[in-house]
Image: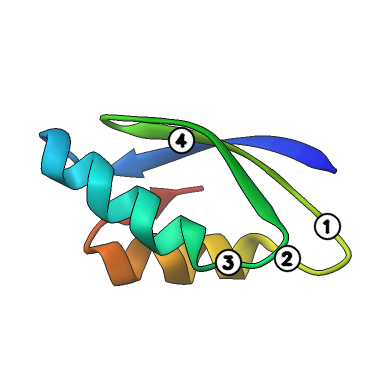
Amino acid sequence: MKSVDLKIEGMTCGHCVMHVKKELSKLSDVKIEDVQIGKARVQYDETKVGPQDFVRAIDEAGYRLVT
């Protein structure tokens, strides 16, 4: 498992955190370590999950992943 810190634009409140957690939890082979306003830390199996999966999940939550 590899760890990555994600920088997320547009989050302003606790509801934002919940939306991001919900979308990230839909990704298989991803363990959410922490989600706070503007950032998230996750562990993932890099053979099954890639950066585009994180971009899509954050986009689905209504925010933008900063790369």
The answer to whether 49 appears left or right of 65 in the picture is right
| Secondary element at image label 4 | strand
Who comes first in sequence, dot 4 or dot 3?
3
| Secondary element at image label 2 | loop
The answer to whether 32 appears left or right of 47 in the picture is left
Task: Say what amino acid the circle numbered 3 marks.
Answer: Leu
Task: Say what amino acid the circle numbered 4 marks.
Answer: Ala
Residue beneath disc 4: 40
Q: Residue at x 27, y 63 (%)?
A: 61
Residue 23 at x, y = what percent?
A: 39, 63
Who comes first in sequence, dot 2 or dot 4?
4
Q: CA distance from mark 4 to mark 3?
A: 14 Å
Evaluate if marks 3 and 2 touch, with contact meaning CB atoms under 8 Å apart.
yes
**Circle number at residue 46:** 1
**Circle number at residue 49:** 2
Front-lying residue, 12 or 15: 15
Type of colouring? rainbow
Q: Is residue 53 above or below residue 8?
A: below
The local crowd at label 3, few if under 14, some if 14 to 19, many if 20 or more residues have their Cα within 10 Å, is some
Residue beneath disc 3: 27
| Secondary element at image label 3 | loop
The answer to whether 55 appears left or right of 61 in the picture is right
